[in-house]
């Protein structure tokens, strides 16, 4: 069984997807971690993100694995260092490269082949798992998205700067050549701006019958 969850940054996808997976006792996969880990490796190796061929070449050679909801890059657990402002900004650029998307999607498909899983990202319901049994699109106003990121305490930016950066990222995400952020026709749409995490989880769990 696949439960696919899409939506913009800060709509609560990760938190909600993780909780749903816990409640159903199935695996959780955050597809954004793959783009973030590739970006981390590119930055560490000083590969210019504008050199698309070098980026693809580097991404192809990486060993990316996902175990217990944590991303492993060439065997190193990098989960805790994937959310810096630099990776936030640059991962959205890396994720625009079509060949990088194919590398990530292939990897995700392999990892999820034989297990029940909750997958969250920007294109899970539309590109990677259009056949998923359950599809959800979580939305939130820019203000709600920025407040949530601010409250995470991992950014050095002000609330206004975060809102600006989220707007920029969402714009990039919506205009991608492939895998752009779209609401699948058959996805359940939930605006989470004024809902608590528990309320969103309850709405989702109510729709899932296993
Ligand atoms: O969900 P996140 O913020 O961790 O994602 C990091 C970046 O990767 C973000 O810019 C969106 C992009 N992304 C994507 O293009 N497709 C996905 N399935 C997941 C994330």
Image (cartoon, grey):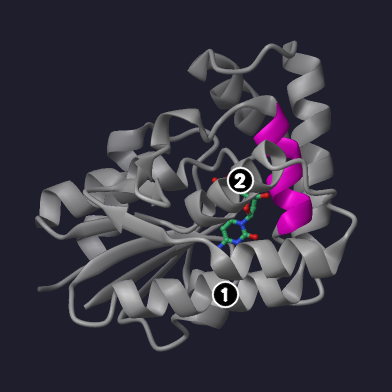
Q: Quarter of the image containing the C terminus?
A: bottom left
Secondary structure mostly seen in the magenta stretch = helix
The residue nearer to you, when weighing 18 against 80, is: 80
Examine the structure image and report whether residue 199 is included in the region drawn in magenta: no
Give me the residue at 75% from left, 11% from top: 158
**Mark 2 = which residue?**
41
Cα distance, mark 2 to mark 1?
Answer: 15 Å
Residue contact at pointers 2 and 1, CB within 8 angstroms: no
**Highlighted magenta segment, given as a residue range:** 86-94
Horizontal placement of 131 versus 95: left or right?
Answer: left
Asked which secondary structure carries label 1, the reply is helix
Position in image of residue 114 (x %, y %): 19, 81
The quarter of the picture where residue 99 lies is: bottom right
The residue nearer to you, when weighing 27 against 196, is: 27
The quarter of the picture where residue 103 lies is: bottom right
Q: Earlier in the sequence, mark 2 or mark 1?
A: 2
Give me the residue at 57% from left, 38% from top: 10
Position in image of residue 104 (x %, y %): 53, 69
* Callout 2 crowding tier (Cα within 10 Å): few <14, some 14–19, many ≥20: some
Asked which secondary structure carries label 2, the reply is helix
**Mark 1 = which residue?**
103
Examine the structure image and report whether residue 87 is included in the region drawn in magenta: yes
> Is residue 156 shown above or below 72?
above
């Amino acid at each position: 069984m696949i439960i696919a969850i899409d939506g913009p940054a800060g709509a609560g996808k990760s938190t909600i997807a993780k909780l749903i997976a816990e409640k159903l006792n199935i695996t959780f996969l955050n597809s954004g971690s793959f783009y973030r880990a590739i970006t981390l490796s590119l930055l560490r190796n000083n590969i210019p993100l504008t050199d698309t061929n070098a980026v693809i070449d580097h991404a192809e050679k990486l060993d990316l694995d996902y175990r217990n909801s944590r991303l492993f890059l060439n065997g190193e657990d990098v989960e805790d260092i994937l959310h810096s402002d630099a990776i936030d900004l640059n991962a959205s650029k890396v994720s625009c490269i079509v060949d990088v998307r194919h590398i990530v999607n292939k990897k995700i498909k392999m990892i999820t082949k034989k297990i029940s899983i909750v997958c969250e990202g920007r294109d899970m319901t539309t590109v990677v798992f259009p056949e998923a049994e359950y599809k959800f699109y979580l939305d939130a106003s820019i203000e709600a998205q920025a407040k949530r990121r601010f409250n995470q305490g991992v950014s050095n930016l002000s609330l206004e700067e975060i809102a600006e950066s989220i707007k920029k990222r969402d714009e990039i995400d919506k205009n991608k050549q492939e895998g752009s952020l779209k609401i699948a026709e058959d996805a359940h749409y939930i605006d989470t701006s004024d809902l608590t995490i528990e309320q969103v989880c309850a709405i989702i769990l109510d729709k899932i019958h296993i």
